Amino acid sequence: MNISNRFKRVRKKYGILLVLILLFIIATLLNSNFLSARNLSNISKQVSITTILAFGETILIISGMLDLSNGSVLALAGLLSVSVFKMTGSLLLAFLVAIIVAVICNILNGIMVTKFKTPPFIATLAMMAMARGAALLYTNGQNIYQIGDYTIFGQGSILGIPTPIIFLVIIAFVTWYILHHTRLGRSLYAIGGNEEAAVASGVNVNKNKMKAYIINGVFVGIAGVIFMSRVNAGLPNGGQGFEFQALTASIIGGTSFSGGIGTAGGTVIGAFIVGTLNNIMNLTAVNSYLQQIIRGAIIALAVIYDTYSKNMKMKSEKGEIEVEEDEKEE
Amino acid sequence: MLKKALLVSMVLVFALVITMSSSVMAQEKYEVAYIARAQGDSFAAWLANSIVNEAENYENINVEVFDGQGSDSKQNSLIENAITNEYDLIIIQPNNGEAQRPYAEQVVEAGIELITTNARIEGIEGGSSVDADPYAQAAVVAERAVEQVPENANVVVLTGPPGNFHSSERRKAWEAEFFEKRPDVTIVGEQIANWNKDEAMRYMEDWVIANDRIDAIISMNDNMAAGALEVVKDDPKFNDILAYGVDGTAEACLLIKDGLMTATTMQSAYALADKLLWASDLLLRDEVIEIHTNIGNPVVDQSNVDKYIEMHEEAGNL
């Protein structure tokens, strides 16, 4: 096999990962501080919250759904968690409250989608408004300050590794495990790929969709805790626009909006492409208006490249199958 | 005799009804619609809450708050609805002054009293305004920074949303009152953090990697200054960093008390609410036909921060 063919194979196989590697090389050339441990840790911390949300989003999109409420639910869950901590001083209780609140919101999303057959876009849009309204109502629009040791979730570290990164790695592993090593994961791919076929093959669609929303709720609750802890305050208007950042990370990472396709690894890569871009533009002091143009253009190019790679891969596989069939006929 | 008694009682009942209705008329309240920019914005929420509280001191005024949710179209619809519902006075805290201008003009055309606030919409004939001067708010801290920021300093600048009147006026003030007077100072990073603490944190995390030395944080509001300080608060390299904001939020006051933040300008929602209700009362009672007034711009620093912390504690912000 010559070098050109080998390169094509690598490009086909790893697609979007090559974009990230290319971005890392360019960033290193542009700024010598880019590859420093502190900067890489910064990027990881900065993307941790939206990546955790993106894992939930990936699971939902794979099964043909989505969540537009995760930014608002993050704010509500985080706020209530901060409040509980201020009242009780219990970190464990505060952490659990965030997860319970986010799971309840997502169970409601799940009920709207599975029982009332509301399109996920509409159901979660409604939840987005309700959760934000509840957060504002609870705090009367005011921030909560002096949250004390609560900051440990977002600003602490274990063996020198910042806690947001530890959460990120654990949740990445959980997502990967669910999607690739459980019956639930296989069912979600089947539902997203072809729901009617999934029903015909005995998959309990509603039950699995509900489970997907519950898992998403757990992730959103954890993200809410990390967010409030990281900013050292309870912000009722926090997390605005996070739903779109999470969707962007998931889609850039190769998750198909039509369902049935997507991976945890791809989502991590997608999130890091966006995070690295933001980071290098700040390190090199790019004008903020120009940043928006570059960000949009590179995201579009990354997705076009990935789609092109996948099409080429499909054509190539189809060609190989046809050749194999021709050989069999001969 | 019976007829006489019936007649007397009817007269008495009639007199009672007249007396009661005139007393009800005398207690009739003026209806005021307050169209807030966005209740999700902590300063806007503080202002809305202060207006509602201040209105309790005026027996003749009832205030209804409507949330513009940070959207021009939403806010314009709310103004139209308030005109249709024939409020006596409409107070607009514009999301974007120019987008709300035609609707504010409709208020005056409909014969309804109008006040624009935080920020005022300039040049509406027949409309009143109560505001803080955003240029002056930044200028008073910028003047201090001229003296405090060390020679050949590296500074970072955080601004609010593009096109926002308060953000652009505050930035202009820093340019004229600080950067033009201190050509030795270098801006090593300037970004739009949209008033948000978390966005400011992200920018500051990158700036401390790219720059060995940052001497001052210049922020167009306190939220963003607090976000930037959150990144360097435990880093001994930045022990002497200076930080300037505007708003006088509860968090900024605590940071000043702890010696982490240098100074801010108090944009008191209480002072704004106080003047708004005072102006509303005068306009509604036809004591005046138009008012334009500003609140003061006191600087908050170590010397006076305690009284502002106390103010926030009394208001339940801390």
Image (cartoon, coloured by chain):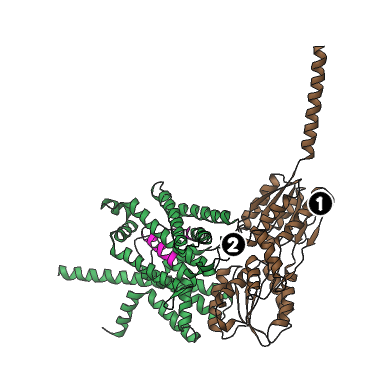
| Viewer-closest of A230 and A298 | A230
Which residue is depicted at the point 70% across and 85% down? B183
- Disc assigned to residue B282: 1
Quadrant hosting residue A6: bottom left
Is residue A61 covered in magenta? yes
Which residue is depicted at the point 62% across and 80% down? B241
Q: Quadrant of the C terminus of chain A?
A: bottom left
Asked if labels 1 and 2 touch by Cβ distance under 8 angstroms, the answer is no
- Disc assigned to residue A20: none
Q: Image check: A248 left or right of B216?
A: left
Count of numbered badges drawn on the protein: 2
Quadrant hosting residue B27: top right
**What element does badge 2 sit on?**
loop
| Viewer-closest of B150 and A176 | B150
Letter of the chain that mark 2 sits on in the rendering: A
| Viewer-closest of A40 and B303 | B303
Residue A125 makes an appearance in the image: yes
Main SS of the magenta part reads helix
Q: Image check: B123 left or right of B79?
A: right
**What element does badge 1 sit on?**
helix
Chain in brown, by letter, is: B
- Disc assigned to residue A143: 2
Q: Image check: B240 left or right of B30?
A: left
Q: Position of residue A264 (x, y in %)?
A: 36, 68
Mark 2, Cα crowd under 10 Å, few <14 / some 14-19 / many 20+, is many
Tell me which amino acid carries mark 2.
Asn
Write down the region rendered in magenta: A52-70
Is residue A110 covered in magenta? no
